[in-house]
Amino acid sequence: MLRREKILTLLVFLFLVHGTYYFLVPEDVHNNESPIKYVKYFLVLLFMGFSLNEKITEKLIFFLLWMPLAFYFNAINNEPDWVNFVGYLLPAYLLFSNETLRKINWSFVVVWVILIASLLGYVEILFLDNHFYMYNASKSDYRVVSIFLNPNNFGIVIAILTFSFILFLESSKYVNAIMFINGIMLVVFSGSKTALGIFVMLTIYNSYRLIRNPKLYKIKRNDVFLLPIIGALLFFLLRLIINFDYSSMRTLEWETLVVRFIDYSEFMGLVENNFLFPWEDAVKNIDNIYLHLWGSFGFPILVLFVAFNIALFILVRSAFAALLSSVFLIIGFTTNFLYLWPLGYFYWAVTSLIFTKPYNDTQRQVEAIEIKHTN
């Protein structure tokens, strides 16, 4: 790997694991004066420095648009949130960096991020008492956070990374099974219904993939050497499943939906007063990217965003790309992913890598991996 590619890989890895600091110092999660909050922006700026030579004209236009958008944002918001403004726009830079993104060693990034997030997640639930207290009022209602700042974020990121490993990294089917078990356990421990729904969707897709190509079940000669290690890991996970006190975990209750619908009703009350720019007179924060985008940037930008995603869905030429598009659209109903770290960056990176080319090669890549496994 060239030196530039190694630097890009390191920057992305550090970007995804810098939340380890919050695991060590959880009280800084909501501390606006903590300097660690600026680390991700520093890493993004470094990434930009190594990718500015790609699509220079498009990137120049992208940054020139920030000024008129800032005036527009300030005019239609009663209380402009400039952190969210930057959070919304900055990840979209990746849309013009697809060739740079392809140079990153994603195998290294995905594997090590999963390992670090999983290890600290298990340390949190096994040995720490109400570690992220700001998200868990009491130990009787605990949700795992690990290195991703809040439980919903953690669960969704783990679901996406787990299936990135299973579908794209050429690993043993037994290792894939371990990753699958690890993923579903951590998603359940996160208490995120959205993450669980995404995990089920991706599981259905992967099951269809295996049914379509039964040769993927074939045992290779080299797989035998992995059996002792896999057996030990399965034993550990089985003991964890059996012995863990699930009464200390948050149950997947549906009462939270009632709270969401109350928030939706209050937001629509603002819409009745000002349909185009509902936050011009008052602000009602809400966990729904479509309503939050409507409030933050007005109805015209919401229409533009929805039309953009519909166009992407129509243009893709593979079932897998369409599935990824659906995953993010579903996440949007419960999570403001566009300005959240790292989900906003995931969205624009996936869009850049998969959807920028109408005749993308993503499905062919998945099929090539399947063929290689069966040979």
Image: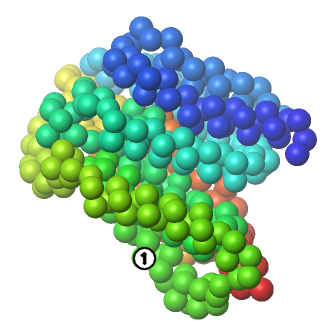
Q: Is residue 349 left or right of residue 225?
A: left
Total of numbered circles in the picture?
A: 1
Local secondary structure at mark 1: helix
Q: Quadrant of residue 287?
A: top left
- Identify which amino acid the numbered label 1 is placed on: Ile
Q: In the image, is residue 79 above or below residue 238?
A: above
Q: In the image, is residue 67 above or below residue 257?
A: above
User: Mark 1 Cα within 10 Å, few/some/many (few <14, many 20+)?
Assistant: few
Q: Nearer the viewer, residue 15 or 141?
A: 141
Q: Residue at x 63, y 31 (%)?
A: 14
Residue most toward the top? 33
Q: Residue at x 31, y 59 (%)?
A: 241
- On the question of residue 159 being in view, the answer is yes
Where residue 20 appears, x then y in whole percent? 50, 29
Q: Is residue 326 left or right of residue 239?
A: right
Q: Which residue is mark 1?
A: 204
User: Which quarter of the rendering shows the N terminus?
Assistant: top right
User: Which quarter of the rendering shows the C terminus?
Assistant: bottom right
